[in-house]
Image: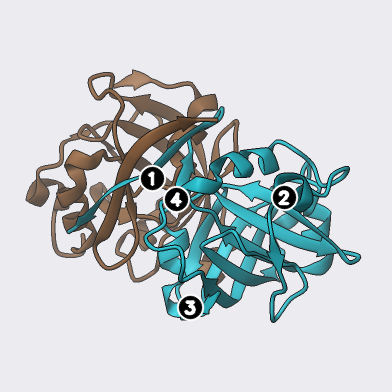
Chain colours: A brown, B cyan
């Protein structure tokens, strides 16, 4: 994984890709699939996201205030769906679905080596957590995998329908 | 424009498309381009979005608490960029760029007839407006254009680079 300038993080999340979110609670890492996130500030990059309290990750994120956002490319799509359709309450999803973790540098939740980018985040504002399960995150450190060139991301349209990135326009 | 069930609204915004946002302040409508938005609740659909106070639309949205989110397909991409690169402070962007408005039914800002979907929204929470310019919206009414079948949306990657929807996966 190679260092990515924090000023470029918005280019990863602004297009709305499905992402993976890792947490670590009492030493036990977990991962979920997430589509409800957005950039809210360029630099330092800040991100808003919704993690439902129906997700096992909610308690971990609220308790520890730390997470990694991993960006999976198209080739990980089937694993991303499996992660989204299972719960860390009763499963080690990394082992079950063959995802490789790597230590983060600033926080305890792991990076996902299979992702083309990873963002180490801390929770910086909890004012809308109770009402909307909406967390404000700051990205402390960003990584990209130089071996994955021009990755195509996936975008969720509901009910298992995903659209893969197509042509690029420069306008 | 045809009525769309509110339960399906998330399928439009969750994939992260670039959208248009209309407001109406003191009887004068305006439109901006927006990429910082996310779903936060399915039904009634609620959406979070960031409208910078550098945008002329910020004051209108804060004062009136009403906006329409219009979803443009790929064929509108050049107009979407022009809307994003100009200000309603000194321009009627609808006239300048040839966008056709239609009256909304529940709020004062107009629908955009050129968009394949339009969402009539009101601001329901302002707690993060001062700090992050983050508004919580509820979608009161949703419309789709039956003449635009399987529209491809565009996703912003920064600096005028956009990616158009590609293949669909069903997983």
Where is B87 relative to A52, above or below?
A: above
Which of pointers 4 and 3 lies earlier in the amino acid sequence?
Answer: 3
State yes or no: discs 2 and 4 in contact (Cβ < 8 Å).
no
Letter of the chain that mark 2 sits on in the rendering: B
Letter of the chain that mark 1 sits on in the rendering: A
Query: x and y percent of residue B1 in the render?
Result: 55, 74
* Mark 2 nearby-residue class (10 Å; few <14, some 14–19, many ≥20): few
State yes or no: discs 1 and 2 in contact (Cβ < 8 Å).
no
**In the image, which disc is placed on residue B153?**
4
Question: Real-space Cα distance between discs 3 and 2?
Answer: 34 Å
User: Considering the numbered disc 2 on the image, is that residue within a helix, a strand or a loop?
Assistant: helix
- Residue A94 lies left or right of residue B135; in this view the side is left
Question: Real-space Cα distance between discs 4 and 3?
Answer: 18 Å
User: Considering the numbered disc 3 on the image, is that residue within a helix, a strand or a loop?
Assistant: loop
**In the image, which disc is placed on residue B131?**
2
Q: Nearer the viewer, mark 2 or mark 4?
A: 4
Q: Residue at x 55, y 71 (%)?
A: A131
Letter of the chain that mark 3 sits on in the rendering: B
Q: Residue at x 20, y 34 (%)?
A: A114
Looking at the rendered structure, whether the residues under marks 2 and 4 are on a common chain is answered as yes
């Amino acid at each position: 994984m190679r260092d990515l300038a924090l000023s470029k993080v918005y280019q990863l999340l602004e297009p709305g890709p499905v992402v993976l979110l890792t947490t670590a609670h009492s030493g036990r890492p977990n991962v979920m699939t997430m589509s409800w996130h957005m950039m809210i500030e360029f630099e330092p990059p800040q991100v808003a996201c919704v993690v439902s309290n129906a997700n096992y990750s909610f308690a971990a994120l609220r308790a520890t205030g730390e997470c990694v956002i991993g960006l999976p490319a198209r080739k990980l799509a089937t694993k991303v769906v499996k992660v989204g359709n299972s719960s860390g309450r009763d499963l080690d999803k990394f082992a079950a679905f063959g995802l490789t973790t790597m230590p983060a540098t600033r926080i305890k939740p792991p990076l996902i080596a299979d992702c083309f980018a990873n963002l180490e985040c801390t929770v910086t504002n909890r004012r809308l957590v109770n009402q909307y399960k909406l967390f404000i995150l700051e990205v402390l450190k960003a990584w990209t995998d130089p071996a994955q060139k021009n990755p195509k991301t996936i975008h969720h349209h509901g009910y298992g329908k995903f659209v893969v990135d197509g042509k690029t326009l420069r306008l």
